[in-house]
Amino acid sequence: MAEIKTYKYFADGSWHDADGSRTFDVLEPYSGKVFARVPAGGRNEARKAVEAAAKAFPAWSETTPAERARLFLRAAELIKRRRGEIAQLLARETGSTISFANFQQDLVAATLEQAAGWMYLPRGQVLESNQPGSHSIGVRRPLGVVASFTPWNGANILSWRAVISPIGAGNTVVVKPSELAPVSAGLMLAEIAEEAGFPKGVINVVTHAPGAASEIADEFFESPDVRVINLIGGVKTARLLAERAGRALKRTVLELGGYNPMIVLDDVDVDYAVRSATFGSFFHQGQICLNTRHIIVQRKVYEQFLEKFIARTKTLPSGDPENPGTIIGPLVTSAAVKLVHDRVEEAVAKGAVLRTGGTYEGQIYQPTILTGVPLDATIAQEETFGPVVWVEPVDTPEEAVRAANRTAYGLSASILAGDTYKAFELAPKIQTGIVNVNAPTVNDEIHAPMGGVRDSGWGRTGPDSLADFSDVIWINSRSTQVQYPF
């Protein structure tokens, strides 16, 4: 039996109990056992964290690039050193397979290492001027306290992504992790930050019990020190936060979900297309924002692709996420299983054909392929966080693009083709923030401007993200006296 650890929340460089020592239990998705006890924080805890971040901001905003880079590199080394421990935590708390857990850590370490270099990028520009004797520059400056909402699904990657760019730009951060993964999506980050030596108050983490996020959000929106609301999450939550942020005149950075179509053209290597579709659709049980939800195949290769795709899907091993051989682990909660199954059943009731899957045991939902999905089925319109994908035949590449653009989302897309030039011609016609040619929709490059359009949010990752967490101040200097009209 693994020990049940009781955690504290992190503010102003130290660990605290919630008022009244309130805690809640976090359950393991696979076993249903208690994984950890975590502080059930509320408005008072959030206020203390924001105050600590505001107090730390002036000094942190003046730190040198060398100091920030040193801390990033130190954090990367600590993550590498604790790789096995963190992988087990991710598997137990989030249902992540060991392979995905290790992938997350490797990506976080590499991101921190690359971000150390971002600290030396130019933070401004010299501007031309029509005024004689004028020297004009634009200089970027940090905004203040950033409130970051982090999700459970790619907990290690996304918690660090919600912190690296804000603090790299000179801000301080308060993290509110998902109550489904408060350790992996926040408290583990705080442990690494503390050991790496980040100054007090630069990174703070406040946890809350299920259903109690509103108290912490209230503090974020009503505090004048919080200048940015940074959400990695779903569209429904984003609409609520963006509305409140608008009233409070706070900036928002929103990394939201995606529907992520994959287009398969008829000159494709079908076996490669099947491998790409299997990975894109079922990686992490379909529980990441980049998963393929809709595969659009030219009719000439449709039957061949579908037959091989179904056969390959049936071979994916499911079970305990701590088993290195497991590909399909559990969904995060029993409610998630019910939502996925309800949508599959609704689609079938409306005329869709279930080709494989559609069953579950415990919280493990078998990888599911549907065809003939009617457009009024929920699964054809909304992101469904689970191992479910539907396949649709089309006649022409142009029809495939129209099918891809039916969704309101716009995060990632994929085009698989033998003729790469043809795929490149089609790519800009898809209304999305990312197009992967001859690669799956699940793809991540640390330095790339990854992000969505339309209902998939706004803001970008990589060095471009530093602009999302800073303002430009225009400084204009005259070397000659100005002649005024009066």
Image (cartoon, rainbow, N blue to C red):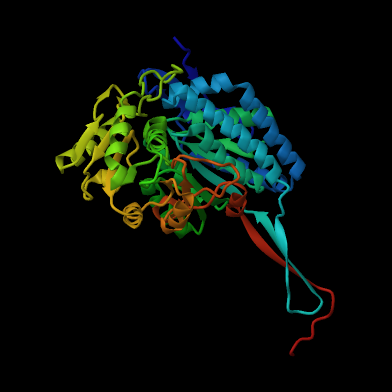
Residue at the image point whose x is 60% and y is 27% from the top: 191
Front position in the image: 355 or 4: 355
Q: Is residue 261 left or right of residue 206?
A: left
Residue at the image point whose x is 47% and y is 46% from the top: 436
Residue at the image point whose x is 33% and y is 44% from the top: 294
Q: Position of residue 47 (x, y in %)?
A: 53, 42
Q: Quadrant of the C terminus?
A: bottom right
In the displayed image of the protein, which residue is found farthest to the top?
1
Q: Quadrant of the N terminus?
A: top left
Instruction: Look at the picture and state if 170 lies above or below 286.
Output: below
Q: Is residue 381 left or right of residue 235?
A: left
In the displayed image of the protein, which residue is found farthest to the bottom?
486
Front position in the image: 80 or 251: 80
Q: Position of residue 147 (x, y in %)?
A: 53, 45
Q: Position of residue 248 (x, y in %)?
A: 48, 57
Q: Position of residue 292 (x, y in %)?
A: 38, 41
Res 21 seen here = no
Q: Is residue 452 left or right of residue 138?
A: left
Front position in the image: 34 or 402: 402
Res 208 seen here = yes
Residue 302 found in image quarter: top left
Residue 474 found in image quarter: bottom right
Instruction: Look at the picture and state if 3 lies above or below 276.
Output: above
